[in-house]
Structures are given as C-alpha cells and as structure tokens.
Amino acid sequence: MKQFLRFYGPPIVIVLLGLIVAFMFMAPAPPKKVVIAGGAAGGAYAATVESYAKALREQNIEVELLSTAGSVDNLAKIKAKQADIGIVQTGLAADFGSEGVRSLGAVFYEPLWVFHRAAAPMDELQDIAGRRVAIGPEGSGVRALATLLLREAGVTPDKYTASPLAGQEAAIALKAGEIDVALVVSGPTTGWITDLVGDGNIALLSMREAHALARRHGYLDEVALYRGVMDLAAVLPKEDITLIAPAAQIAVRADLHPAIQSLLIEAAFREHAGGSLLADAGRFPTPELSDIAISDEAERYYKNGPSFLRRIFPYSVANFLERAWVLVIPLVTLIIPLVRAAPPLYRWRIRRKIYVWYNDLRELEAAGRAAETPEDRTEVRAKLADLQAETGKVEVPVSYTDDLYRLRAHIRFVAELVDKLAAQERHARI
C-alpha cells in the first residue's frame, strides 16, 4: 500500500481535484420544497394538486399548498414567483401573459357549461342577448372565456346584463331566478353541476358551434357528455350534449428544476391517463391543448417517456446520476492518460532508486583510476565498500531485483578494478 500510494497517489489527487472542479459545474440538485397554487377548497383544482403533492412528498419533497381564487390567480402567483406550480385554464395566456411560465401539458377537460332557465329556451349562444348572465368576476378565467365566445357569436357586452357570479353561487342564483343564464367552468363530477343537470327547471345548452370553436382556438376541444354518463340510474343527462371545453394545464415556473417537472408529469399520467367522463383513456396528459409554451423537460418526456435511468433507479438515485454525467468527461480525460502514464512512471521511480547510485560509482571509478598513491586507492576502496553496503539496504519489488544485483555487481567490478590497478603499481615498483 505504501508503494501504491507513493506512485499512484499523485494521479489520484489529480483525479480528485478534477472531480471537485466538475462538481462546481454540475447541475444543481432539485429543491427540497415547492409551493403549489391550487384553487378554492373543495374544487377540482384543489383535489388535483393534492394528488400531485402526495406524489412529491413520497420523494421527500416538502410541499406547501396555496388556496387561491382560481386560474388567473394561480397564473399571477407563478409569474410573481410566489408559487412554483399551479393549475391554469388554457386560453388565459393571451389575456394575462405567461412570461416566465411554462406548461407541462393539459391534464383534464374543464367544459364551459351554459345553463339557462328551461322556461326560456335557448338553441345557440346568440340567444343570450337581452338576458341576465353570470359570467364570473372580473379577471377570472371563466369570464375571459365567456366574453371571448360571446363576442365571436356577436353578443357584445352591451347586449346582455353581466353578473360577476361564478361556480356554486351562480348555480344558486340561477335556480332562484335571480339570473337567466349561467356560464360556468367546472368538471362534470362537481356536485352543483350534477344538481343543475338533474333540475327539471334548468336546461343545459348543447353547443352546436363547438366544432367550429375548437377549430378556431387550439386550446379548446369539442367534447361529448353522453346520455346517462353522469348518473345512469337517473339518466343524467337525458340526451347527448355537446360542450366546448378548455383544459386544465399544469403551469410551472420556467426555472423549476427538470426533476420536479418529471415527477409532476409522472403523477399526471398516473392520475389522468385512465380517462374520465369526458375523455377517453390515454387522452391526458397531453401537450396539444396548452396555450403556454411547453417546457423542454415536458417535450422530452412526451417524446421519449421517463429517462433511461429513471426506468431503472429510484428518483433520488436517477436524479443524481443524470446530474453527475458532467463528471464523466473530466474522469475519462484524466484517468486514461494517468493510467497509461502511471506504469512507466512507476518503473522510472523504482529504477531511479537504483540508477542514482551509478553517478557515485562512476565518480569512484574515475577517482580510482586517477589515484597516485596507495593511500588514495585505499580511500576509494573504502568508499566502494560503503557504497556496496548502502545499496544492500535498498528495497525494491522482486521484479526489479535483477537491476539491483546488477548494480552491486558493477560496484564489485569497480572495486576489483581498483585492486588490480593497485597490484599493477606494486609490481611496477618491484
């Protein structure tokens, strides 16, 4: 181990330094907490974000749920960075903007229901003219959609009396006769929607213009509410109804970590891919109806599905490995040349321990040849003996002992040479 660290220690240190530098450029880890803007308590949005929050909490991500006024409020909170995630009705981006916001796709239909008093029949949107109409409060998603569709039908605001009521309040007012028409946006499983559909004094407009509206606006879709689909025993509705529907989409901050986005899309597939009263299985989630730009992560997910690593590993492991890919480049760049260079470096370091003695040996040989007196040769001979003793203490791996013994043999050769020169000088004197 001592020898290993001595020779491979520097390459290991270089690799570790490279990893440290690479970590500095590694993508940041996902946040430990996110804020989700839902909707009013008891509504479809609130129930939906609760299921998403559960999926995130299962991955040890803290979730804060905000109760909001609905789509417009959710969009505003995301734009203001007061929330990271929210449910937003499609079709609002044109009126309220979506700067700094991205969509993960639409997840379920939110049809526009046009309820009216049965005593005052309606066949088309144009029949709303001259009536008291609930279209939601100013700045709400339902008001933006209702106003747009009525304008396109030629029913401008001066042709009807607008009421700011929305949701259940509008339903109560319609049943009480305080308004004539209620344009509301909600899911078909909402209690007060079912109540209105089953009320004999209230009628639901089947929108014959739905197909045309869907063609004119990419965020709208024509949906069918089939006879009996809401309650088969009570046969609700009594006949097939055609509705025009925007969709609820998952809106996120543009800088929300891709790993969180991926978790949300996974949760959306589990929650909505099975279909609903208005949508076939597999219809949602989808990027098709979104009017907010789809995020890069969502585009990748819809095209390729979960990442390769996510299919194999749990979320936390897959996320780390996906972020750590940047480490591969410095590792490969450093390790390959270091691994290739380490063996020659190791051999050089070992042999250097042996060959360094040859400088002393050459100097002693030169001194022995140049010696003019027996005392000088005796001194050289003593130094050679010391050199032989010192080289005997050198430790090298077994595979390099031949080089060590060759050095010791050379020392002995020089010693014998000095002895021979001394003998020759003695004979010359005789």
Image (cartoon, helix red, strand yellow):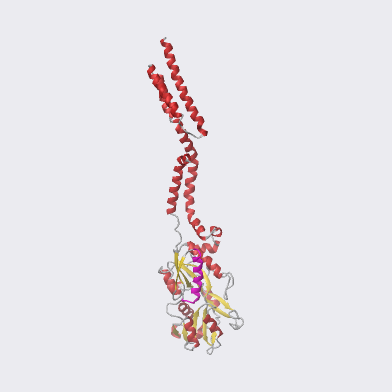
In the rendered view, tell whether residue 94 sits above or below residue 195. Answer: above
Residue 304 in the figure: left or right of residue 39: right
Task: Where is residue 83? Give x, y as percent.
Answer: 43, 69
Is residue 286 at least partly visible in the picture? Answer: no
Indicate the quadrant containing the C terminus: top left, top right, bottom left or bottom right: top left
Task: Where is residue 402? Give x, y as percent.
Answer: 51, 30
Is residue 13 at least partly visible in the picture? Answer: yes
Using the image as rendered, state which of residue 389 and residue 150 is in the foreground. Answer: 389
- Magenta-tinted stretch: 40-59
Residue occupying the far bottom of the picture: 119
Q: Which residue is located at x 48 percent, y 30 percent?
A: 404
Residue occupying the far right of the picture: 233
Most prominent secondary structure in the magenta stretch?
helix
Q: Is residue 50 magenta?
A: yes
Using the image as rendered, state which of residue 59 and residue 203 is in the foreground. Answer: 59
Q: Which residue is located at x 43 percent, y 31 percent?
A: 356
Q: Is residue 120 magenta?
A: no
Residue 143 in the figure: left or right of residue 243: left
How many numbered dots are placed on residues in this image? 0
Task: Where is residue 282? Give x, y as percent.
Answer: 58, 69
Task: Where is residue 244? Give x, y as percent.
Answer: 53, 77
Q: Which residue is located at x 54 percent, y 61 percent?
A: 306
